[in-house]
Image (tube, rainbow, N blue to C red):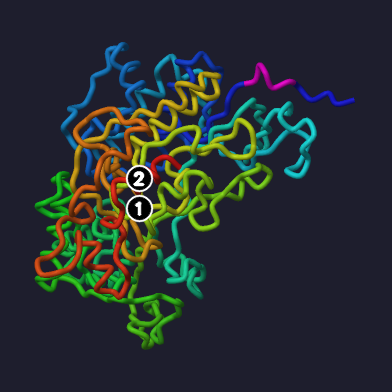
Protein backbone atom coordinates (compact mmCIF):
# COMPACT_ATOMS: atom_id res chain seq x y z
CA UNK A 1 0.00 0.00 0.00
CA UNK A 2 1.25 3.51 -0.84
CA UNK A 3 1.17 5.56 2.36
CA UNK A 4 2.81 8.70 0.99
CA UNK A 5 1.18 11.86 2.36
CA UNK A 6 -1.21 13.98 0.32
CA UNK A 7 0.35 17.22 -0.91
CA UNK A 8 -2.85 19.29 -0.56
CA UNK A 9 -1.99 20.76 2.85
CA UNK A 10 1.75 21.02 2.37
CA UNK A 11 3.52 24.36 1.90
CA UNK A 12 4.98 25.74 -1.30
CA UNK A 13 8.77 25.61 -1.02
CA UNK A 14 10.69 28.65 -2.25
CA UNK A 15 14.40 28.01 -2.76
CA UNK A 16 16.43 31.16 -2.17
CA UNK A 17 16.06 34.11 0.19
CA UNK A 18 17.20 36.85 -2.17
CA UNK A 19 15.06 39.66 -3.62
CA UNK A 20 13.05 37.40 -5.94
CA UNK A 21 12.64 34.55 -3.46
CA UNK A 22 11.35 36.95 -0.79
CA UNK A 23 9.06 38.54 -3.38
CA UNK A 24 7.62 35.09 -4.06
CA UNK A 25 6.91 34.77 -0.33
CA UNK A 26 5.18 38.15 -0.32
CA UNK A 27 2.85 37.18 -3.15
CA UNK A 28 2.17 33.71 -1.77
CA UNK A 29 1.21 35.30 1.54
CA UNK A 30 -1.10 37.69 -0.31
CA UNK A 31 -2.72 34.70 -2.03
CA UNK A 32 -3.20 32.95 1.32
CA UNK A 33 -0.89 30.08 0.38
CA UNK A 34 1.25 28.28 2.99
CA UNK A 35 4.94 28.50 2.12
CA UNK A 36 8.48 28.09 3.37
CA UNK A 37 11.52 30.03 2.11
CA UNK A 38 14.77 28.07 2.22
CA UNK A 39 17.85 30.29 2.22
CA UNK A 40 21.18 28.48 2.03
CA UNK A 41 23.16 31.22 3.76
CA UNK A 42 23.13 32.59 7.32
CA UNK A 43 21.05 35.61 6.33
CA UNK A 44 18.74 36.75 3.55
CA UNK A 45 20.54 38.07 0.50
CA UNK A 46 23.68 36.03 1.20
CA UNK A 47 24.75 36.11 -2.45
CA UNK A 48 24.23 39.87 -2.66
CA UNK A 49 26.43 40.35 0.38
CA UNK A 50 29.32 38.93 -1.64
CA UNK A 51 29.09 41.94 -3.95
CA UNK A 52 27.86 44.27 -1.22
CA UNK A 53 30.51 46.87 -2.03
CA UNK A 54 29.16 47.34 -5.57
CA UNK A 55 26.71 50.14 -6.31
CA UNK A 56 23.91 49.20 -8.70
CA UNK A 57 22.97 51.28 -11.77
CA UNK A 58 19.29 51.64 -11.01
CA UNK A 59 17.63 53.73 -8.30
CA UNK A 60 15.83 52.19 -5.35
CA UNK A 61 12.40 52.44 -6.97
CA UNK A 62 13.27 49.60 -9.36
CA UNK A 63 14.88 47.41 -6.72
CA UNK A 64 11.78 46.91 -4.56
CA UNK A 65 8.92 44.54 -5.32
CA UNK A 66 5.62 46.49 -5.35
CA UNK A 67 3.90 43.97 -3.09
CA UNK A 68 6.79 44.05 -0.63
CA UNK A 69 6.76 47.86 -0.63
CA UNK A 70 3.07 47.84 0.31
CA UNK A 71 3.74 45.48 3.24
CA UNK A 72 6.71 47.47 4.51
CA UNK A 73 5.04 50.86 4.11
CA UNK A 74 2.09 49.66 6.18
CA UNK A 75 4.47 48.59 8.95
CA UNK A 76 6.11 52.02 9.25
CA UNK A 77 9.22 51.16 7.25
CA UNK A 78 11.77 53.92 6.84
CA UNK A 79 11.87 53.72 3.04
CA UNK A 80 15.05 54.74 1.20
CA UNK A 81 15.17 57.61 -1.27
CA UNK A 82 13.60 56.31 -4.49
CA UNK A 83 16.18 58.17 -6.58
CA UNK A 84 19.28 57.01 -4.69
CA UNK A 85 21.52 54.22 -6.02
CA UNK A 86 22.02 51.48 -3.41
CA UNK A 87 25.03 49.28 -2.96
CA UNK A 88 24.44 45.57 -2.62
CA UNK A 89 24.99 45.89 1.12
CA UNK A 90 22.43 48.69 1.35
CA UNK A 91 19.99 46.61 -0.65
CA UNK A 92 20.24 43.86 1.96
CA UNK A 93 20.25 46.05 5.05
CA UNK A 94 17.72 48.63 3.90
CA UNK A 95 15.23 46.32 2.18
CA UNK A 96 15.75 42.57 2.42
CA UNK A 97 16.34 42.40 6.17
CA UNK A 98 13.27 44.50 7.06
CA UNK A 99 11.20 42.42 4.64
CA UNK A 100 12.50 39.16 6.12
CA UNK A 101 11.53 40.40 9.60
CA UNK A 102 7.97 41.27 8.57
CA UNK A 103 5.31 39.06 10.21
CA UNK A 104 4.15 37.90 6.78
CA UNK A 105 7.61 36.46 6.02
CA UNK A 106 9.58 35.80 9.22
CA UNK A 107 7.66 32.69 10.44
CA UNK A 108 8.14 31.06 7.04
CA UNK A 109 11.87 31.73 6.58
CA UNK A 110 14.56 29.14 7.26
CA UNK A 111 18.21 30.18 7.16
CA UNK A 112 21.22 27.88 6.64
CA UNK A 113 18.85 25.61 4.73
CA UNK A 114 20.77 24.81 1.55
CA UNK A 115 18.89 22.49 -0.80
CA UNK A 116 20.88 19.54 -2.11
CA UNK A 117 18.24 17.93 -4.33
CA UNK A 118 14.59 18.14 -5.39
CA UNK A 119 12.37 15.26 -6.47
CA UNK A 120 9.05 13.53 -5.93
CA UNK A 121 8.67 11.54 -2.73
CA UNK A 122 9.44 7.88 -3.26
CA UNK A 123 9.71 7.91 -7.06
CA UNK A 124 12.30 8.94 -9.61
CA UNK A 125 12.00 11.04 -12.75
CA UNK A 126 11.04 8.06 -14.90
CA UNK A 127 7.80 7.12 -13.14
CA UNK A 128 4.65 8.80 -14.45
CA UNK A 129 1.75 6.97 -12.80
CA UNK A 130 0.48 8.95 -9.82
CA UNK A 131 3.25 11.51 -10.13
CA UNK A 132 1.12 14.59 -9.60
CA UNK A 133 -0.30 13.22 -6.37
CA UNK A 134 3.15 12.77 -4.88
CA UNK A 135 4.53 15.69 -2.88
CA UNK A 136 7.89 17.16 -3.69
CA UNK A 137 10.72 16.11 -1.41
CA UNK A 138 13.55 18.60 -0.90
CA UNK A 139 16.66 17.13 0.70
CA UNK A 140 18.82 19.70 2.49
CA UNK A 141 22.57 19.51 2.90
CA UNK A 142 22.16 19.12 6.68
CA UNK A 143 20.24 15.87 6.10
CA UNK A 144 16.77 17.21 6.84
CA UNK A 145 13.85 16.86 4.46
CA UNK A 146 11.08 19.27 3.43
CA UNK A 147 7.86 18.07 1.80
CA UNK A 148 6.04 20.55 -0.44
CA UNK A 149 3.07 20.66 -2.79
CA UNK A 150 4.94 22.95 -5.20
CA UNK A 151 8.45 24.31 -5.65
CA UNK A 152 9.65 27.73 -6.78
CA UNK A 153 13.39 27.72 -7.45
CA UNK A 154 14.71 31.27 -7.02
CA UNK A 155 18.25 30.22 -6.08
CA UNK A 156 19.96 32.41 -8.67
CA UNK A 157 23.25 31.77 -10.44
CA UNK A 158 25.82 33.53 -8.28
CA UNK A 159 27.32 30.24 -7.08
CA UNK A 160 27.98 29.11 -10.67
CA UNK A 161 30.31 31.62 -12.35
CA UNK A 162 31.35 30.95 -15.91
CA UNK A 163 34.94 29.74 -16.21
CA UNK A 164 37.79 31.58 -17.90
CA UNK A 165 38.12 29.09 -20.76
CA UNK A 166 37.16 30.57 -24.11
CA UNK A 167 35.02 27.56 -25.06
CA UNK A 168 32.81 27.75 -21.99
CA UNK A 169 34.78 25.04 -20.21
CA UNK A 170 37.36 25.46 -17.49
CA UNK A 171 40.78 26.17 -18.91
CA UNK A 172 43.39 23.48 -18.45
CA UNK A 173 44.86 24.09 -15.01
CA UNK A 174 42.11 26.50 -13.96
CA UNK A 175 41.24 24.39 -10.92
CA UNK A 176 44.89 23.79 -10.05
CA UNK A 177 45.46 27.54 -9.73
CA UNK A 178 42.21 28.26 -7.89
CA UNK A 179 44.05 30.14 -5.15
CA UNK A 180 45.10 32.76 -7.72
CA UNK A 181 41.73 33.06 -9.47
CA UNK A 182 38.67 34.96 -8.21
CA UNK A 183 35.27 35.16 -9.90
CA UNK A 184 32.76 37.98 -10.02
CA UNK A 185 33.62 41.28 -8.33
CA UNK A 186 35.95 40.85 -5.34
CA UNK A 187 36.28 43.80 -2.98
CA UNK A 188 39.74 44.81 -4.19
CA UNK A 189 39.64 48.19 -2.42
CA UNK A 190 38.42 46.83 0.89
CA UNK A 191 38.28 43.29 2.24
CA UNK A 192 40.57 41.84 -0.47
CA UNK A 193 42.91 44.80 -0.92
CA UNK A 194 45.94 43.00 0.51
CA UNK A 195 45.53 40.22 -2.02
CA UNK A 196 45.84 42.56 -5.01
CA UNK A 197 47.96 45.46 -3.77
CA UNK A 198 51.28 45.62 -5.63
CA UNK A 199 50.38 42.60 -7.79
CA UNK A 200 50.10 41.98 -11.53
CA UNK A 201 46.38 41.43 -12.06
CA UNK A 202 44.55 40.16 -15.16
CA UNK A 203 40.82 40.94 -15.44
CA UNK A 204 38.89 38.70 -17.87
CA UNK A 205 35.55 39.77 -19.35
CA UNK A 206 33.92 42.62 -21.24
CA UNK A 207 30.80 43.45 -19.22
CA UNK A 208 30.15 45.96 -16.47
CA UNK A 209 31.46 43.56 -13.82
CA UNK A 210 34.82 43.54 -15.59
CA UNK A 211 34.76 47.35 -15.81
CA UNK A 212 34.05 47.56 -12.08
CA UNK A 213 37.05 45.34 -11.38
CA UNK A 214 39.36 47.33 -13.66
CA UNK A 215 38.41 50.69 -12.15
CA UNK A 216 38.67 49.40 -8.59
CA UNK A 217 42.15 48.04 -9.29
CA UNK A 218 43.24 51.37 -10.76
CA UNK A 219 41.94 53.08 -7.63
CA UNK A 220 43.89 50.59 -5.50
CA UNK A 221 47.03 51.46 -7.48
CA UNK A 222 46.87 55.01 -6.13
CA UNK A 223 47.83 53.67 -2.70
CA UNK A 224 49.74 50.61 -3.95
CA UNK A 225 51.83 51.91 -6.90
CA UNK A 226 53.22 48.50 -7.82
CA UNK A 227 49.78 47.26 -8.89
CA UNK A 228 49.52 46.64 -12.65
CA UNK A 229 46.28 45.93 -14.49
CA UNK A 230 45.72 43.99 -17.71
CA UNK A 231 42.26 43.61 -19.20
CA UNK A 232 41.57 40.56 -21.39
CA UNK A 233 38.48 40.02 -23.50
CA UNK A 234 37.48 37.68 -26.29
CA UNK A 235 36.13 40.35 -28.59
CA UNK A 236 38.47 41.94 -31.11
CA UNK A 237 37.50 45.55 -30.47
CA UNK A 238 36.86 47.63 -27.37
CA UNK A 239 34.11 49.54 -29.18
CA UNK A 240 30.76 48.97 -27.52
CA UNK A 241 32.09 47.80 -24.15
CA UNK A 242 31.70 51.27 -22.63
CA UNK A 243 27.92 51.42 -23.13
CA UNK A 244 26.14 54.66 -23.90
CA UNK A 245 28.30 56.93 -21.71
CA UNK A 246 26.66 60.39 -21.89
CA UNK A 247 23.78 58.93 -23.95
CA UNK A 248 22.93 56.42 -21.25
CA UNK A 249 19.74 57.30 -19.41
CA UNK A 250 21.18 55.56 -16.35
CA UNK A 251 23.83 58.14 -15.38
CA UNK A 252 25.75 55.80 -13.08
CA UNK A 253 26.13 53.21 -15.81
CA UNK A 254 27.12 55.85 -18.33
CA UNK A 255 29.72 57.23 -15.94
CA UNK A 256 31.20 53.77 -15.46
CA UNK A 257 31.69 53.36 -19.19
CA UNK A 258 33.13 56.85 -19.56
CA UNK A 259 35.68 56.25 -16.79
CA UNK A 260 36.69 52.94 -18.37
CA UNK A 261 37.24 54.60 -21.75
CA UNK A 262 39.34 57.35 -20.18
CA UNK A 263 41.48 54.79 -18.36
CA UNK A 264 42.11 52.84 -21.58
CA UNK A 265 42.85 55.91 -23.70
CA UNK A 266 45.25 57.33 -21.09
CA UNK A 267 47.27 54.11 -21.02
CA UNK A 268 46.57 53.29 -17.37
CA UNK A 269 46.15 49.60 -18.18
CA UNK A 270 47.01 47.04 -20.84
CA UNK A 271 44.29 45.75 -23.15
CA UNK A 272 44.72 42.15 -24.32
CA UNK A 273 42.17 41.54 -27.09
CA UNK A 274 41.13 39.35 -28.64
CA UNK A 275 42.46 36.77 -26.19
CA UNK A 276 40.93 33.32 -25.92
CA UNK A 277 42.22 31.59 -22.80
CA UNK A 278 43.07 27.88 -23.01
CA UNK A 279 45.25 27.01 -20.01
CA UNK A 280 46.95 28.11 -16.80
CA UNK A 281 50.47 27.05 -15.88
CA UNK A 282 53.14 27.86 -13.31
CA UNK A 283 55.66 30.49 -14.27
CA UNK A 284 59.32 29.48 -14.52
CA UNK A 285 60.13 31.51 -11.42
CA UNK A 286 57.20 30.02 -9.55
CA UNK A 287 56.16 33.51 -8.48
CA UNK A 288 53.17 33.83 -10.78
CA UNK A 289 50.79 32.05 -13.11
CA UNK A 290 51.03 31.98 -16.89
CA UNK A 291 47.69 32.47 -18.64
CA UNK A 292 47.97 31.09 -22.15
CA UNK A 293 45.76 30.88 -25.22
CA UNK A 294 45.63 32.46 -28.61
CA UNK A 295 45.40 36.00 -29.89
CA UNK A 296 44.38 36.56 -33.51
CA UNK A 297 45.11 32.92 -34.24
CA UNK A 298 48.62 33.00 -32.77
CA UNK A 299 49.78 31.56 -29.43
CA UNK A 300 49.85 34.19 -26.70
CA UNK A 301 50.52 34.17 -22.97
CA UNK A 302 50.79 36.61 -20.11
CA UNK A 303 52.32 36.11 -16.66
CA UNK A 304 50.41 37.58 -13.72
CA UNK A 305 50.02 37.13 -9.99
CA UNK A 306 46.22 37.18 -9.79
CA UNK A 307 43.30 36.65 -12.18
CA UNK A 308 39.75 37.99 -11.81
CA UNK A 309 37.23 36.25 -14.07
CA UNK A 310 34.09 38.30 -14.76
CA UNK A 311 32.49 36.36 -17.62
CA UNK A 312 28.96 35.90 -16.30
CA UNK A 313 27.14 33.01 -14.66
CA UNK A 314 25.18 29.87 -15.45
CA UNK A 315 22.41 27.93 -13.64
CA UNK A 316 23.08 25.02 -11.31
CA UNK A 317 20.81 22.24 -12.59
CA UNK A 318 22.44 19.40 -10.69
CA UNK A 319 20.02 19.57 -7.75
CA UNK A 320 17.11 19.29 -10.23
CA UNK A 321 18.19 16.05 -11.91
CA UNK A 322 15.07 14.21 -10.66
CA UNK A 323 12.71 16.98 -11.76
CA UNK A 324 11.17 16.82 -15.23
CA UNK A 325 12.52 19.92 -16.92
CA UNK A 326 12.09 21.30 -20.40
CA UNK A 327 15.41 23.09 -20.82
CA UNK A 328 16.60 24.91 -23.90
CA UNK A 329 19.79 23.18 -25.11
CA UNK A 330 21.54 26.50 -25.67
CA UNK A 331 20.53 28.82 -22.85
CA UNK A 332 19.55 26.27 -20.18
CA UNK A 333 16.40 28.33 -19.59
CA UNK A 334 12.87 26.93 -19.93
CA UNK A 335 12.13 25.95 -23.53
CA UNK A 336 9.22 28.36 -23.79
CA UNK A 337 11.08 31.34 -22.37
CA UNK A 338 14.36 30.80 -24.23
CA UNK A 339 13.29 32.17 -27.66
CA UNK A 340 12.09 35.36 -25.97
CA UNK A 341 15.42 36.06 -24.27
CA UNK A 342 17.97 34.52 -26.65
CA UNK A 343 20.95 36.93 -26.70
CA UNK A 344 21.74 35.84 -30.26
CA UNK A 345 18.52 37.64 -31.23
CA UNK A 346 17.61 39.86 -28.30
CA UNK A 347 20.83 41.76 -27.88
CA UNK A 348 19.00 44.86 -26.70
CA UNK A 349 15.56 45.95 -25.53
CA UNK A 350 13.35 43.40 -27.24
CA UNK A 351 12.68 40.91 -24.42
CA UNK A 352 8.90 40.86 -23.85
CA UNK A 353 7.30 40.69 -20.40
CA UNK A 354 6.49 37.17 -19.28
CA UNK A 355 5.17 35.17 -16.36
CA UNK A 356 4.06 31.73 -15.23
CA UNK A 357 2.93 30.53 -18.64
CA UNK A 358 6.39 31.02 -20.12
CA UNK A 359 8.03 29.41 -17.07
CA UNK A 360 6.11 26.11 -17.07
CA UNK A 361 8.03 22.83 -17.04
CA UNK A 362 6.72 19.28 -17.60
CA UNK A 363 6.92 18.76 -13.83
CA UNK A 364 3.56 20.02 -12.50
CA UNK A 365 3.76 22.84 -9.96
CA UNK A 366 7.48 23.38 -10.42
CA UNK A 367 8.88 26.75 -11.49
CA UNK A 368 12.28 28.40 -11.85
CA UNK A 369 12.15 32.18 -11.45
CA UNK A 370 14.64 35.00 -11.07
CA UNK A 371 18.07 35.07 -12.61
CA UNK A 372 18.20 31.27 -12.80
CA UNK A 373 15.13 31.28 -15.06
CA UNK A 374 17.21 33.02 -17.75
CA UNK A 375 19.85 30.29 -17.76
CA UNK A 376 22.89 31.70 -19.51
CA UNK A 377 21.11 34.69 -21.05
CA UNK A 378 22.59 37.91 -19.63
CA UNK A 379 19.50 40.10 -19.90
CA UNK A 380 17.75 39.41 -16.58
CA UNK A 381 16.43 42.28 -14.47
CA UNK A 382 15.37 42.18 -10.85
CA UNK A 383 12.10 43.91 -11.74
CA UNK A 384 11.39 41.10 -14.20
CA UNK A 385 11.90 38.60 -11.37
CA UNK A 386 9.40 40.42 -9.18
CA UNK A 387 6.76 40.09 -11.90
CA UNK A 388 7.60 36.42 -12.37
CA UNK A 389 7.06 35.90 -8.62
CA UNK A 390 3.65 37.58 -8.70
CA UNK A 391 2.49 35.62 -11.74
CA UNK A 392 3.69 32.24 -10.43
CA UNK A 393 2.10 32.84 -7.00
CA UNK A 394 -1.20 33.59 -8.74
CA UNK A 395 -0.89 30.41 -10.82
CA UNK A 396 -0.24 28.21 -7.78
CA UNK A 397 -3.22 29.79 -6.03
CA UNK A 398 -5.41 28.81 -8.97
CA UNK A 399 -5.92 32.36 -10.24
CA UNK A 400 -4.92 31.62 -13.81
CA UNK A 401 -6.35 34.86 -15.16
CA UNK A 402 -4.04 36.87 -12.90
CA UNK A 403 -1.15 34.59 -13.81
CA UNK A 404 -1.65 35.30 -17.51
CA UNK A 405 -2.06 39.04 -16.98
CA UNK A 406 1.62 39.92 -17.03
CA UNK A 407 2.18 43.44 -15.69
CA UNK A 408 5.56 45.09 -15.71
CA UNK A 409 6.53 48.71 -15.20
CA UNK A 410 9.99 49.67 -16.39
CA UNK A 411 11.50 53.08 -17.04
CA UNK A 412 12.10 54.39 -20.50
CA UNK A 413 15.73 53.93 -21.44
CA UNK A 414 17.47 54.21 -24.76
CA UNK A 415 20.52 52.22 -23.76
CA UNK A 416 20.41 48.54 -23.04
CA UNK A 417 23.97 47.34 -22.96
CA UNK A 418 25.11 44.09 -21.45
CA UNK A 419 25.27 41.70 -24.39
CA UNK A 420 28.63 41.52 -26.05
CA UNK A 421 29.34 40.05 -29.46
CA UNK A 422 30.57 37.02 -27.54
CA UNK A 423 27.52 36.12 -25.45
CA UNK A 424 29.48 33.83 -23.13
CA UNK A 425 31.30 36.89 -21.88
CA UNK A 426 28.19 39.01 -21.37
CA UNK A 427 27.13 40.66 -18.16
CA UNK A 428 24.93 38.56 -15.92
CA UNK A 429 22.85 41.35 -14.49
CA UNK A 430 23.97 40.95 -10.89
CA UNK A 431 24.19 44.68 -10.33
CA UNK A 432 21.13 45.93 -12.21
CA UNK A 433 17.74 46.22 -10.56
CA UNK A 434 15.27 47.49 -13.05
CA UNK A 435 16.79 48.79 -16.27
CA UNK A 436 19.36 47.74 -18.80
CA UNK A 437 19.66 44.90 -21.24
CA UNK A 438 16.20 43.45 -20.75
CA UNK A 439 14.13 46.62 -20.77
CA UNK A 440 11.56 45.72 -23.39
CA UNK A 441 11.02 47.69 -26.55
CA UNK A 442 7.46 48.13 -25.36
CA UNK A 443 8.45 49.75 -22.08
CA UNK A 444 8.08 53.30 -23.33
CA UNK A 445 7.28 55.72 -20.54
CA UNK A 446 6.05 53.99 -17.40
CA UNK A 447 2.90 52.19 -18.52
CA UNK A 448 1.95 48.68 -17.36
CA UNK A 449 2.88 46.14 -20.03
CA UNK A 450 0.97 43.07 -21.11
CA UNK A 451 1.97 40.39 -23.60
CA UNK A 452 -0.69 41.69 -25.96
CA UNK A 453 0.81 45.18 -25.97
CA UNK A 454 4.42 44.29 -26.65
CA UNK A 455 4.31 43.92 -30.41
CA UNK A 456 3.06 47.41 -31.18
CA UNK A 457 6.14 49.32 -30.08
CA UNK A 458 9.13 49.69 -32.43
CA UNK A 459 12.62 49.00 -31.21
CA UNK A 460 14.40 51.98 -29.73
CA UNK A 461 16.86 53.52 -32.13
CA UNK A 462 20.47 53.06 -31.16
CA UNK A 463 19.56 51.11 -28.02
CA UNK A 464 22.49 48.71 -27.78
CA UNK A 465 25.24 50.74 -26.21
CA UNK A 466 24.02 54.03 -27.66
CA UNK A 467 23.95 55.46 -31.18
CA UNK A 468 26.27 53.94 -33.76
CA UNK A 469 29.61 55.72 -34.35
CA UNK A 470 29.53 58.28 -37.13
CA UNK A 471 30.31 56.90 -40.57
CA UNK A 472 29.30 53.32 -39.81
CA UNK A 473 26.48 51.37 -41.42
CA UNK A 474 24.94 50.23 -38.14
CA UNK A 475 21.94 50.88 -35.93
CA UNK A 476 23.84 51.09 -32.64
CA UNK A 477 27.25 50.64 -31.01
CA UNK A 478 26.94 46.87 -30.56
CA UNK A 479 25.74 46.45 -34.14
CA UNK A 480 28.80 48.35 -35.37
CA UNK A 481 31.07 46.28 -33.12
CA UNK A 482 29.59 43.00 -34.34
CA UNK A 483 30.01 43.99 -37.98
CA UNK A 484 33.58 45.12 -37.36
CA UNK A 485 34.28 41.64 -36.00
CA UNK A 486 32.92 40.07 -39.19
CA UNK A 487 29.46 39.15 -37.86
CA UNK A 488 26.16 40.06 -39.52
CA UNK A 489 25.30 42.48 -36.73
CA UNK A 490 23.71 42.40 -33.30
CA UNK A 491 20.18 41.85 -34.62
CA UNK A 492 18.46 44.64 -32.76
CA UNK A 493 17.58 46.64 -35.84
CA UNK A 494 16.45 43.74 -37.97
CA UNK A 495 12.93 43.15 -36.73
CA UNK A 496 9.98 45.08 -38.11
CA UNK A 497 7.08 45.91 -35.78
CA UNK A 498 5.13 43.01 -37.31
CA UNK A 499 8.02 40.62 -36.63
CA UNK A 500 8.27 41.93 -33.08
CA UNK A 501 4.56 41.26 -32.59
CA UNK A 502 5.03 37.70 -33.79
CA UNK A 503 7.91 37.17 -31.39
CA UNK A 504 5.95 38.61 -28.47
CA UNK A 505 3.03 36.31 -29.14
CA UNK A 506 5.09 33.11 -29.02
| Nearer the observer, 11 or 418 | 418
- Element carrying mark 1: loop
Question: Mark 1 and 2 residues: CB-CB less than 8 Å, in contact?
Answer: yes
Extent of the magenta region: 6-10
Q: Residues within 10 Å of mark 1 (few under 14, many from 20)?
A: many
Q: Describe residue 308's horizontal placement relative to residue 446 as left or right.
A: right
Which residue is at a point 37% across and 56% down the rendered structure image?
345
Quadrant the C terminus occupies: top left
| Nearer the observer, 485 or 378 | 485
Q: Main secondary structure of the magenta part?
A: loop
Outermost residue, front side: 498
| Vertical comparison of 55 with 22: above or below | below
- State the image quarter where residue 447 is shown: top left
| Tag 2 residue | 351
Which residue is at a point 29% across and 54% down the rendered structure image?
418
Quadrant the N terminus occupies: top right
Percent across and percent down for residue 200 are 28, 73
Comes first in the chain, label 1 or label 2: 1
**Residue 377 in view:** yes
Q: Describe residue 370's horizontal placement relative to residue 130 as left or right.
A: left
Percent across and percent down for residue 48 are 37, 41
- State the image quarter where residue 216 is shown: bottom left
In the rendered image, residue 377 lying in the magenta stretch gets the answer no
Q: Describe residue 206's horizontal placement relative to residue 463 as left or right.
A: right
| Tag 1 residue | 346
- State the image quarter where residue 325 is shown: top right
Percent across and percent down for residue 227 are 22, 69
Amino acid sequence: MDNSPSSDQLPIAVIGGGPVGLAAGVHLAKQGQPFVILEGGPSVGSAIREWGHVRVFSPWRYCIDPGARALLDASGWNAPDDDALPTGRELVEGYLRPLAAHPSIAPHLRLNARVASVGRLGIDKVRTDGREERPFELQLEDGSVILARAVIDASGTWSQPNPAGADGRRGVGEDAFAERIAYGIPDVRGTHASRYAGKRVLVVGSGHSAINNVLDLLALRETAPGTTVSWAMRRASTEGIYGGEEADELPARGALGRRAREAVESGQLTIVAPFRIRRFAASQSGAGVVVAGDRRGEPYEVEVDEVIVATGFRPDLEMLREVRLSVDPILEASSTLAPLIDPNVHSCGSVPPHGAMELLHPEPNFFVIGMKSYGRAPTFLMATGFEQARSVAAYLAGDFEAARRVELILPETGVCGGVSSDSAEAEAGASCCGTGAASTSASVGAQPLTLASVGSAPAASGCCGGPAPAGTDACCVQDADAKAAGDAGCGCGAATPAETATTAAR
